[in-house]
Amino acid sequence: MKSFSKTNSEKPVSRGIQTSPFRAMHNQMKILIVDDMPVYARIIGNVLKRIPGVEVVKTASDGLQALMGISELKPDDYVGY
């Protein structure tokens, strides 16, 4: 998908797709899931795994496991409920 903007001559000018600096530096975004209900954690993990560029690195069932996983694995983000 390309975006276009009008110039003084009214011709469309392609600006291309902007890539975030994060995506340019990393191939995958590492995610840690935190949920005390295994069923919900599994559902969230299955949804996230289907997204290109997302890797679920750990599933934690409580805050202590989450903190240990964050310090050990250094995920880019975490999902908790």
Image (tube, rainbow, N blue to C red):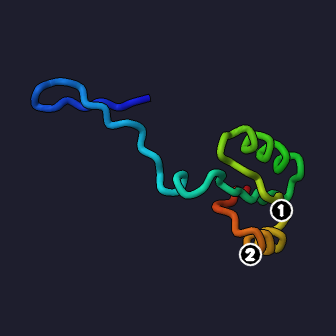
For the N terminus, the quadrant is top left
On screen, residue 74 versus residue 15, left or right, reads right
**Residue type, label 2:** Ser
Q: Write down the residue under mark 2.
A: 71
Q: Write down the residue under mark 1.
A: 60
Between residue 14 and residue 49, name the one nearer to us: 14
Residue at point 55%, 58% (across, down): 25
**Dot 2: what SS?**
helix
Tell whether label 1 touches label 2 (CB within 8 Å): no
**Dot 1: what SS?**
strand
User: Of the residues under marks 2 and 1, which one precedes in the sequence?
Assistant: 1
Q: In which quarter of the image is residue 73?
A: bottom right
The mark lying in front, picked from 2 and 1, is 2
Residue at point 10%, 31% (across, down): 8
**Residue type, label 1:** Ala
Q: Does residue 40 lie above or below 33 as drawn? A: above
* Residue 26 image point, x, y percent: 60, 56
Name the residue furthest top.
11
* Residue 63 in sight from this viewpoint: no
Q: In which quarter of the image is residue 47?
A: top right
Between residue 25 and residue 8, name the one nearer to us: 25
C-alpha span from label 2 to label 1: 13 Å
